[in-house]
Image (cartoon, grey):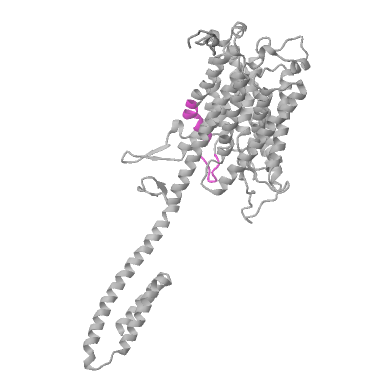
Amino acid sequence: KGLVQNHIKDVSLFQTNCSAPMAAPFLQTVFILVFLLEQCGTSSSKEAGLDRLVAELEEWSQQQNARIEVLEAEVVARQLLVRPLNDSSPSIFGDGPRRRSYTTQENLNGAADHFWIILCGTVIMLMQAGFALVESGSCRVRNTQNILLKNLTDVCVGTLGWWILGWSFAFSGPVDSDGFKSNFAGSEQFAGHTFLEARSDGQQEPTVNIAKWYIQWAFATTATTIVSAGVAERVLFPGYCIYSLCMTCFMYPIVAAWTRGGGFLAKFNDAGFVDFGGSGFVHLTGGVGALVGACVAGPRKERFLDMLSAKDRVLLPTEPFSPHSIPLTVLGTFILWFGWYGLTCGSTLNMSSIENGYLAAHVAMNSTIAAATGGLVAWFARLAMFRKHDAHGMCNGILGGLVSISAACANIECGSAFVISALGVLLSVGASAGLKALKIDDPVDAVPVHGVCGAWALLAAALFDWGNGFSNAHGAQGFRCVIDAATKTCRSDNLASKLLVSNLLEFCTIVAWVGGLSLLIFLPLRLANLLTASDDQQDCGFDDEKHMPVTAYDLNAAMPHTVI
């Protein structure tokens, strides 16, 4: 009986450290044994049975004590398993100082995020083909190869510039405790340094920065390509390469650092700023660069005749400078429309939760509505101006609608997308006419489509925000409002006006930064005769003088009896 009582004490102590279901079977067994002992008599005839029962109890007690030790070890193991999630980093190898294996959920989330980023980055990259087709089709045939070469160079030169310097300025540290950039720009991870961490055994530990670098590279090269459209057909190739390298190495990365990289615009006030798909830091940046380049390079030879009034420059057809291939322009527009889903939906930057899935779908719907609305509005506007259908103008309307919605595609209703796109395209059509009246030569309407619509998008993203009235705001939070940290409810301290101020500050910052630096680059190139082609070169065309073969199209191949 004493042995049983001691065992009961052991079980009670174990019960205080373990859950009831773990200790209950032991108590039930002990109670049965106590009952059996009470049934045992004290006569000598029963002593043998009692001795045997005591021996069995001792053996059973040892077994249960051993089991208790195993269960206690399991409890400790569970505690140790949970603790590393808070104070160590996951590793594909699952070992090393302050390292642990990825959990199953982390594996699934990481795979989904990387697949999403690579897919969207690749779709954005396809936009380069669309830009090449739209730009070359919108210009004269004599310069087709030169335009295509500049588009190829934008990507190749821009990639090396982004790899060596651009990423570091835009998205590397140092950052403060709240995750915001603590300096003017980043100053770490040049040329992909620390993207892989070398282990002592020579193996490599990857980081998430590899995938982030890829999709942000696609954004960077897009901004640079916009500039090439604004200065097409009269800018010398070496001078443009210098500007392209400066754009991807320094100008665009600094804008990205201040906005998406967590710089001063991201922490300017409690509302932050909202530029989800890059209307400001991508399209406005490219549009401002295109405007400065077009002004400094000057118009193409005989583009604007002195005897024509401003009204005639806007309304009279200019056949010598008309697009040489509407099919290329239309095909390029459809490719850009397709690629835009990578630009806007991909700005979720991850796909490891159902909320991000819903948000990407909402962004896709708003983008689609905006593109369709923009095309129709431009079609009707150009029809009213010229009394003829203009497929090229409709293409620019589609692109203008997409630029107009990119900033606000994740924080507005679909009805607002319709209104924002319509108003943005009307502003674009008006800006296109205004540039012609001012004798600013923009062959592809890059400034009205990307610059004007990009500026309007920043304003519209704040004005049409989901927030409840003007006291609340959603901004960059998507479906969620900006939360008060103390009450865990939507803040209502006039956040809408703060959001508007932040977006206006983004507009002013981009115009001043990109416009000023573009002028510092283009103007010396112009003075050094490295920017604008001579009149003879423009008359002859870049393809005939600078390229081989001398024309982009072999028109003789279509003649009878010609071997192809």
The picture places residue 75, in percent across and down from the top left corner, at 38, 64
Measured along the vertical axis of the image, is residue 546 above or below residue 345?
above
Residue at 60% from the left image edge and 8% from the top image edge? 534
> From what the image shows, is residue 194 above or below residue 238?
below
* Place of residue 324 in the rendered image (x, y in percent of width and height, measured from the top left): 62, 16
Query: What residue is rendered at 60% in x and 31% in y?
Result: 337
Q: Residue furthest bottom?
A: 43
Observer able to see residue 396: yes
Nearer-the-camera pick, 224 or 512: 224
Q: Give coordinates of residue 465: x percent, y percent.
A: 69, 43
- Most extreme residue toward the top is 536
Q: Position of residue 429 (x, y in %)?
A: 72, 26
Viewed as shown, does residue 550 lie left or right of 56? Answer: right
Does the magenta segment cover residue 528?
A: no
Q: Nearer the viewer, residue 44 or 256?
A: 44
* Residue 172 in view (yes/no): no
In the rendered structure, the answer to whether residue 44 lies left or right of residue 289 reads left
Q: Looking at the picture, tell me which residue is in the foreground, 516 or 3.
A: 3
Number of numbered callouts drawn: 0
Residue 28 in the figure: left or right of residue 300: left
Q: Quadrant of the N terminus?
A: bottom left
For image coordinates 34% across by 80% down, the residue present is 30
The stretch in magenta equals 159-181
